[in-house]
Amino acid sequence: MSVVDIHCHILPGLDDGSPDMATSIAMARLAAAAGISTVIGTPHWIEDEHETDPTVVRQTAKDLQAELNSRAIPLSVLPGNEAFICPDLPDRLKKGDILTLADRGTHLLLELPYEDLPTYVDDVIFRLQLMSITPVLAHVERYAYVRSDWHVLDRWVQRGCLAQVNASSLDRAQGDDVAQDLMDRGLIVCTASDAHDAKIRRPRSLKDGYDLGHLVDDSHCANQLQHAEEEE
């Protein structure tokens, strides 16, 4: 069964994550050692500020995979994006400017502003769903409006969104129980590393049973959906 890290900035030189191939290889070794079998490289996509070229993202994932294969590092790398929400995000996705998770055309890793909730969020989510795209809300434990009122996230989950928390946020040594509270309420379908380097924001083990393995392993889809329904 695949253990998939759906949110990782492992692709070299594309954003504020890994700066070079050597760092990406070191991150891959850590991910494999943590029991992860597949990583989706999700460089930031921010309209008019940091628009990664899908062709470059795909090729960079292939180049990294070749390097890992040559070193017998047992990790698969697939392309994706972490897309920052904007009013015309569905149109940009339809044009092919943004990559879905694993380039499968089914799930989009969606980042929201940390402090202020835009008025157009519900409309963008609805339009994505009309395109048969399931929004996966990135690191929801960071958003001020979710931290102050978990019902905000609950409404999105009830409307068909999936929610992800960072594995590091489940470390009680950090003194923050928000991520665990959201999981206990059945609002979280997966954890991810959101790794950016091999030292501080590094790949780590994911909570057992909380990954979207069906993105790369269709045989796991039924089990994952059943798990999500049980958590609700």
Image: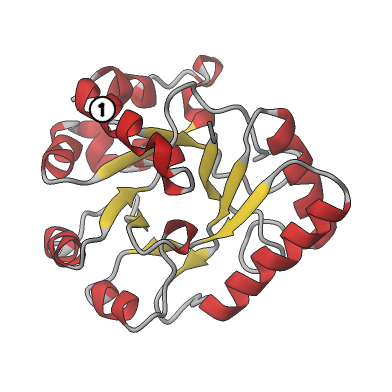
Is any part of residue 211 visible from this angle?
Answer: yes
When asked about the image quadrant of residue 3, the answer is: top right
Residue 169 falls left or right of residue 34: left
Which quadrant is home to the C terminus? top left
Q: Position of residue 61 (x, y in %)?
A: 65, 64
Colour setup of the view: secondary structure
Furthest residue to the front? 219
Q: Is residue 45 above or below residue 181?
A: below
Q: Dot 1, how many residues are within 10 Å of its Cα: few (below 14), some (14-19), or many (20+)?
A: few
The residue at the point 26 percent across, 54 percent down is 134
When asked about the image quadrant of residue 204, the answer is: top right
**Which residue, given by chain and number where applicable, does mark 1 sit on?**
226
Q: Position of residue 175 (x, y in %)?
A: 47, 18
Give 19 or 27, whichever is nearer the viewer.
27
Q: Amino acid at mark 1?
A: Gln
The residue at the point 73 percent across, 44 percent down is 28
Q: Is residue 87 above or below residue 202?
A: below
Give 30 or 172, whichever is nearer the viewer.
30
When asked about the image quadrant of residue 33, the answer is: top right
Q: Position of residue 221 (x, y in %)?
A: 35, 38
Q: Is residue 9 above or below residue 186?
A: below
Give 204 or 113, whichever is nearer the viewer.
204
